[in-house]
Image (tube, rainbow, N blue to C red):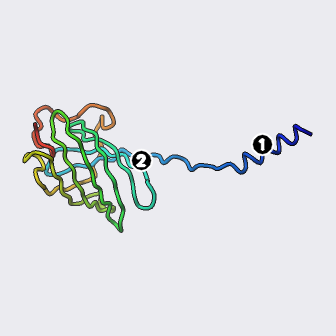
Amino acid sequence: MRTVFAILALAALVLTAQIRPAEAQASGPFCFSMQPFTDILVLFVAPNGGNQFIVTGRDLVTGSALSATIFITGNLAVLSFSIPSNFISHPFSGTANINTATGSGPGICEAVNTGGGCGTGTGIQMTLVGCPAGSTSGEPTAPAGTENLMGGRR
């Protein structure tokens, strides 16, 4: 009788336990070019509720990590990003309104503490592109001597 009671208690506990939703899995990589600059951003996107998404990734040219958010409103994905400095570029941030049907849209970027690169506000055109080989590795993929960086050369 004790065994039956223990099994029933265990079954009741299992059936009434709080079940947590599965962790959101990131989708990606998604790569964007940022004309007029040579930077390619590699993005991984995870839902954060509603029409909001958390974005992580990196700038392929400089190797810098990036953090961003996306908010979908109508047919626009509003991307706001920040990229810290490293040995070859200054920190910079930006935002773009990307059309969800075309994968392209205008934006603006700004570099911190420099007139080079984005400077105090440069118009950009973000366009979804195919991710080059090595997009998910840890090495920058820019050819030596690349000068047209959003964050500018140090």
Mark in front: 1 vs 2: 1
Is 55 left or right of 62, judged from the image as shown? Answer: right
Q: Dot 2 corresponds to which residue? A: 27
| Identity of the residue furthest to the right in this view | 1
Residue 10's mark? Answer: 1
Where is residue 50 drawn, in percent x and y? 44, 61
Identify which residue is drawn at 24% across, 56% down.
95
Compared with residue 59, is residue 80 higher up or lower down, i.e. above or below? Answer: below
Q: Residue furthest bottom?
A: 74
Residue type at numbered disc 2: Ser
Q: Measured from the top left, where is residue 27 in percent x and y?
A: 41, 47
Mark 1 lies on a secondary structure that is helix
Q: 134 or 152: which is nearer to us?
A: 152
Q: If the image is split into quadrants, where does the C terminus sit?
A: top left
- Name of the residue lying farthest toward the left: 115
Local crowd at mark 2 within 10 Å, few (<14), some, or many (≥20)? few
Residue at 20 percent across and 50 percent down: it is 34
Which numbered circle lies on residue 35? none
What x and y, as percent, mark residue 8? 83, 45
Q: CA distance from mark 1 to mark 2?
A: 38 Å
Which residue corresponds to the image point at 38% horizontal and 51% vertical from the top-left?
54
Which quadrant, please, contains the N terminus? top right
Total numbered labels:
2
Of the residues under marks 1 and 2, which one precedes in the sequence?
1
Question: Label 1 is placed on what type of residue?
Answer: Leu
Secondary structure, mark 2, is: strand
Q: Is residue 106 above or below residue 17?
A: below
Decide: marks 1, 2 in contact (CB < 8 A)? no
Front one among 101 and 23: 23
Label 1 crowd bin: few (<14), some (14–19), many (20+), radius 10 Å: few
